[in-house]
Image: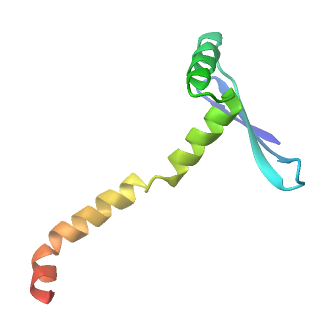
Amino acid sequence: MFGLANAGRVISLGKARDPRGDVMATISITLSDAGLDELRTRSAHAGLTPEAFLSRHAEQLLERPDEAFQQAAAYVLAKNAELYRRLA
């Protein structure tokens, strides 16, 4: 496990085994008391544990297309729109 300093916060990364024996990544973050209270409130509202809430949102974030790629693709499509129209 190792830690990264991030604007005064510590983020720790590691590995652990789930009940089935599969290796899963673990992440530990440091939150203020207010941040932890807000996390608990939002996760309870969603009917999830704080850990499940953060895991779900991290997975959703990682599933989003990369914004830089989206911008580059939009630029190429717009730049070549006339060519694509002629080829169609």
- Residue 76, horizontal then vertical, whole percent: 24, 69
Q: Residue at x 65, y 40 (%)?
A: 55
| Quarter occupied by residue 27 | top right
Pick the quarter of the image with the N terminus: top right
- Residue 10, horizontal then vertical, whole percent: 70, 29
Check the image and name the residue furthest to the top: 34
38 is higher (above) or lower (below) than 81: above
Check the image and name the residue furthest to the front: 47
39 or 28: nearer the viewer: 39
Q: Is residue 40 left or right of residue 1?
A: left
Q: Residue at x 9, y 86 (%)?
A: 86
The answer to whether any part of residue 83 appears in the image is: yes
60 or 14: nearer the viewer: 60
Q: Residue at x 59, y 11 (%)?
A: 34
68 is higher (above) or lower (below) than 27: below
Counting the numbered discs, the total is 0
88 is higher (above) or lower (below) than 59: below
The answer to whether any part of residue 10 appears in the image is: no
Q: Residue at x 88, y 53 (%)?
A: 20
- Residue 13, horizontal then vertical, whole percent: 75, 42
